[in-house]
Image (tube, rainbow, N blue to C red):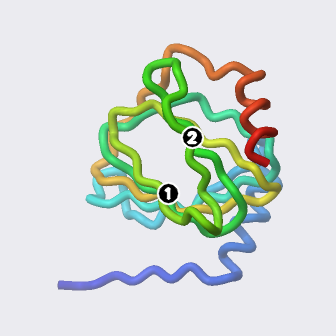
Amino acid sequence: MVCEIRVINKLEIERLNDLAVRSENKRERISLHASHDSKIQEMLICMVGKNHYIKPHKTSNEKSYIWLEGRLLVVIFDEDIISKICTLDQDNKVIRLDSEKFHTTIPLSENTKYLEIALGPYKGTTYADWNFEDEQYIKLQHQYE
């Protein structure tokens, strides 16, 4: 059996950050998995700035967020009602989610990096048919800063 090893060094993380700075949505990722069919989906994600709206969504598999840098809120919903808010930061390094919960992420720092790991294969993302209101988003961001 061949064992592939992928090492992400400081230079690659700096490049990832530069790509995020230049991208329209101010975020970028490095996928560590080979394809959507991989048994484990691993993504190193970089968000630059605090103005990121990611529509509440869910996937068919469980996932975890592992802290690398900055601060990130993970907001979990029961339909369109906030049911739990978790902070991913130097004190709370890992958050694990069930697959059937809608959730979103809100960066609280100017530079946020985390590893997202989900069981594969990837079968798509279901987006909520409702929106997380701007005033709720901004209120949470200020409340947890």
Q: Earlier in the sequence, mark 1 or mark 2?
A: 1
Q: Position of residue 38 (x, y in %)?
A: 30, 58
For this view, does 60 lie left or right of residue 102?
left
Q: Is residue 134 above or below residue 118?
A: above
Dot 1: within a 10 Å radius of its alpha carbon, few (fewer than 14), some, or many (20 or more) residues? many
Question: Residue at coordinates 77% horizontally, 39% vertically from top-left?
Answer: 143
Which residue is disc 1 drawn over? Answer: 65
Most foreground residue, 21 or 96: 96
The type of residue carrying mark 1 is: Tyr
The kind of residue on which mark 2 rests is Ile
Question: Where residue 37 sits in the image (x, y, percent)?
Answer: 28, 52
Residue that appears at 78% across and 42% down? 24
What residue appears at the point 68 percent right and 73 percent down from the top-left corner?
Answer: 13
Q: Is residue 135 above or below residue 143?
A: above
How crowded pointer 2 is (Cα within 10 Å; few <14, some 14-19, many 20+) is rated as some
Residue in view at x 71 percent, y 48 percent: 107
Q: Secondary structure at mark 1?
A: strand
Q: Quadrant of residue 56?
A: top right
* Residue sitting farthest toward the top: 129
104 and 123: which is toward the camera? 104
Camera-nearest label, 1 or 2 = 2
Callout 1–callout 2 Cβ contact below 8 Å: no
Residue 138, by quadrant, is: top right
Residue 89 marker: none
Distance of label 1 from label 2 (alpha carbons): 14 Å
Q: Which residue is mark 2?
A: 85
- Horizontally, residue 42 falls left or right of residue 120, namely right
Q: Position of residue 92 (x, y in %)?
A: 56, 62
| Horizontal and vertical percent position of residue 30 | 56, 63
